Image (cartoon, rainbow, N blue to C red):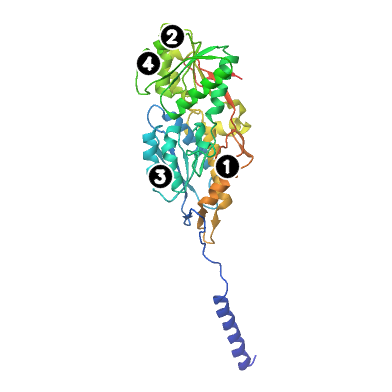
Amino acid sequence: MSKRLLIVFSALILATLVLSACGPQASAYECTDSIGCVTVAPGDPIHLAYAMVINGPDATLGIDSRNGVEIAIAEKGQLLGHDFQLTGEDDGCSAEGGQAAGTKLAADTTIVAVFGTSCSSAARVAVPLLSQAGFVIISASNTAPDLTLPGNENNWPGYLRTAHSDTFQGAAAAQFAVDYLHATKAATIHDGSLYAESLANQFAESFKGLGGTITAQEAVDPNQTDFKSVLTSLAPGGPELIYYPIFIKAGALITRQAKETTGLENVALMGADGMFSPDVSSGAGDASEGLYVSSPDLSAFSAKYSTFFLPKYQEMFGSEPISIFHAHAYDAAWIVMNAIEKVAVQDADGTLHIPRQALRDAMYATTGYDGLTGKLSCSPTGDCANPVIAVYEYHAGEYPPVKVWP
C-alpha cells in the first residue's frame, strides 16, 4: 500500500471512530413513572420489608407469616442477579403499633414492598402512610372487609391482600353454628379491635339471616384478665354458642372462665383465625377441649403445601407452622417477586430500576397465580384471596386443632 493510500485509509478509520463516538448510544435510564422508581445498584439487594406483630401475646401470628415470606425468598434466591433483603417493624397488632411501624418504614425510600400488617387495626393507620410513600403493601392476614371495598376511604392505592374478607368467614361461622351445632341462639364478644368487632358483627348478621337469635353482643378490653362479669351477663339469655373472634391472650382466658361460669358450662365456644395458635391450647389448658375456631381451610391448599412448604418450614424454623397465615404470606411474597420481575429494567452493569406505579399495576393484574392457598387473581381494589373457610376443634394438650367442618 502506498504512503498516500495509507494516510487516506487511516483518516477514514479515525473519522469512523469519531462519528461512532458521537452517534446514538444506549441512553441512561430515565424514570418516568408517576410515583417514582427504586434504583438498586449493582451487587445491592432488593429491599423488602414487613410490618407484623412479632412480640407479645399475639407474636405467633406475625412470626408465622414472616416465616412464610422467608421461605418464598429462600426458594427464589435471586431476581435478575440481585439478592433480597428483608427487614421489618413490629405492628403490635394495634393502631398504635401500626402508626409507629408505618412511620418508620415509610421514611425508607429503598423499600420496594411491605408485607403486612398482621392485624386490620394496624392496617387502618399504617397503610395510608405506606401508600403515600409509594410502596406496594400486601397483607397475609388483614381481614376487615372495608380494606378492599371499592370507593371506600380505607381502600388505599397499592394495598392488596391474600387473606380472605371477614364477610366470608363470618358467614361460614354462622353456617357452621346452624348446620353442625344446630344452634338457634348465640352471643358474641369482641375486644374493640377492627378485626374482632367486624367479624363478630358479620357472624351476627349471618346467623340472624339463617333464622338464629343473637342473645347479646358484648365488648371487652383485651388487656383485662377477669371476664367473669361479662360472661355471667350472657348466661340468662341462654345462648347455645358464644362466638368471640378475638386474639390469643384474651381468647384463652375467656375460654377458661366460660367453663367456670354458672349457666355456661355446656355452651359451645368458638373463636376465629386470631385464636389459631399453640398459645391458645397452652393458655386455656384443659378448657380448650371442644373449643372451635373458624379459619382458612388447610385441606383446600395445593399439593405443594404438603410436599414442599411444610418440610421446608420444619427445616428452616425447626417446627410445624405456629399460626394459620404462613401459606398466605408465602403466596404474597411470590406475587410481589413475580411483579418486580415483570416491570424491572436492568442496565448493562446490573443496576436495577423498579418503577413503583408499574409495580402496583402488575400486582393488581395478577391472574391465575397457582399459589399454595389456591389459584389467585387480584381485583382492582386488592382482593387476591381464594376464600375457603373451615372450622377446627381443639383437643386439650394437642396442636393443631382438627378440622370438623365442612
Label 2 sits on a secondary structure element that is helix
> Mark number for residue 235?
2
In this rendering, the label closer to the viewer, 1 or 4: 1
* Earlier residue among tags 2 and 4: 4
Expressed as whole percent of the image width and height from the top left, the position of residue 356 reads 50, 51
Question: Measuring 54% from the left and 76% from the top, which residue is drawn there?
Answer: 21
Q: Which mark is residue 227?
A: 4
Q: Around disc 3, counting alpha carbons within 10 Å, would you say few (fewer than 14), some (14 to 19), or many (20 or more)?
A: many
**Mark 1 to mark 4: distance in Å?**
42 Å
Residue 105 got which mark?
A: 3
Kind of residue at badge 1:
Pro
Between label 4 and label 3, give the one nearer the viewer: 4
Q: Nearer the viewer, residue 317 or 220?
A: 220
Kind of residue at badge 3: Leu
Q: Which of 140 and 278 is in front in this view?
A: 140
Give the residue at mark 1: 380
CA–CA distance in space, label 4 to label 3:
37 Å
Q: Which type of secondary structure does the marked residue at label 1 adopt?
A: loop
Q: Give the mark, 4 or 3, whose residue is nearer the N terminus.
A: 3
Mark 4: secondary structure = loop
Q: Which amino acid does label 4 sit on?
A: Phe
Q: Position of residue 364 (x, y in %)?
A: 57, 44
Whether the residues at callouts 1 and 3 have beta carbons within 8 Å, the answer is: no
